[in-house]
Amino acid sequence: MSGEAAHHWIVVLDIENFSSRPDPIQRSLRAAMYEVLGEALLQAGLPVDGVVTEDRGDGVLMIVPATVSPIVLAGPFVRALDDELRQKAVVHSPAHAMRFRVALHQGIAARDREGWSGDAVNTACRLVDAGPLRKVLAAAASSRMVFVVSDEIYRAVVRHGHRSIDPAAYLPMPFHTKHGELIGSWVTVPGCPAPPGLGGASSGPSGRDGRTGQDGAAAEPRATRADTGGQEGTATGRQPAGGAGISVGTVHGDVFQGDKTVTVHTTGPVRP
């Protein structure tokens, strides 16, 4: 039966390297996945009857009512998933290792006889399938899961630092879809101070900067051109031999009298 399109929180969960396992292992992993998901919902206090799940073979699409707090989804629910995966890891063999990629988005979705659809559902699936997200989980070899949120969720929920959420543990992960669309997202690895494997992430005044280059990767940090005319400027590196050396990040016009020479060392472009 078709339903009216309405706002929902959208969670997508996938098992890492699922299709590379033998059929018996895949069946066992699916059973374990639903056990972990069910326990995590209970532990986080989420309304199990109100959360709609749609099977995706190697994962699950979850449609969560808008009445549920997204703080619970991004905080206690993610922690509960990680805790349940830790319990499974104690008894699972290496061949049966189970790690998750989990994405959280929001938007309008509608239900028909076969399932759920909407651009928000498509975006959530693109988040969980993103190549950079797979690389983060591969780099976090000792972790059990990676969690990515859309830029909308980051701005509305994560960045405010609610009691159960640490925004400092997130880094920007912009990426291009196969259709060339640039999607902004933020990623964290539970238990890690920062997600590994991003490489190109840049830091801004707050320590987290979502600027992107033309290729969709996070921009490299830029050095700021120093002003040699007696005004305050910023610079990195040291003076070469023969000049007055200074290693601080800011050069003030009254540090020395007379003419000043500042050498800027940078691995990226410097805007004039």
Image (spheres, rainbow, N blue to C red):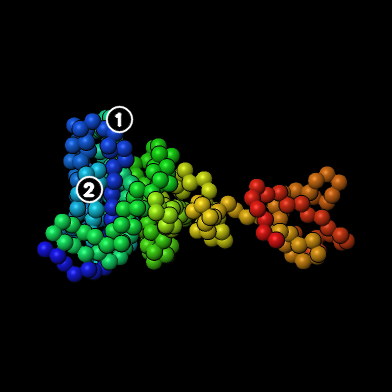
Along the horizontal axis of the image, is 125 left or right of 231?
A: left
Going by the picture, which residue comes out furthest to the left? Answer: 1
Q: Which mark is residue 113?
A: none
Q: Nearer the viewer, residue 42 or 243?
A: 243
Q: Where is residue 116 in the image (x, y as percent from the top left)?
A: 21, 59
Q: Which amino acid does label 1 sit on?
A: Pro
Going by the picture, which residue comes out furthest to the front? Answer: 179
Q: Which amino acid does label 2 sit on?
A: Arg
Mark 2 = which residue? Answer: 56
Q: Nearer the viewer, residue 67 or 183?
A: 183
Report which quarter residue 257 is drawn in: bottom right
Along the horizontal axis of the image, is 128 left or right of 117?
A: right
Gap between marks 2 and 1, in whole Å?
23 Å
Q: Position of residue 145 (x, y in %)?
A: 34, 44
Residue 252 seen anywhere in this rendered image of the structure: no
Q: Which of marks 2 and 1 is nearer the N terminus?
A: 2
Residue drawn at x 83%, y 51% as measured from the top left: 244
Going by the picture, which residue comes out furthest to the right? Answer: 258
Element under disc 1: helix
Mark 1 = which residue? Answer: 94
Element under disc 2: loop
Q: State which mark lies toward you, 2 or 1.
A: 2
Whether the residues at callouts 2 and 1 have beta carbons within 8 Å, the answer is: no
Along the horizontal axis of the image, is 246 left or right of 114?
A: right
Residue drawn at x 22%, y 68% as measured from the top left: 5
Residue drawn at x 37%, y 47% as measured from the top left: 146
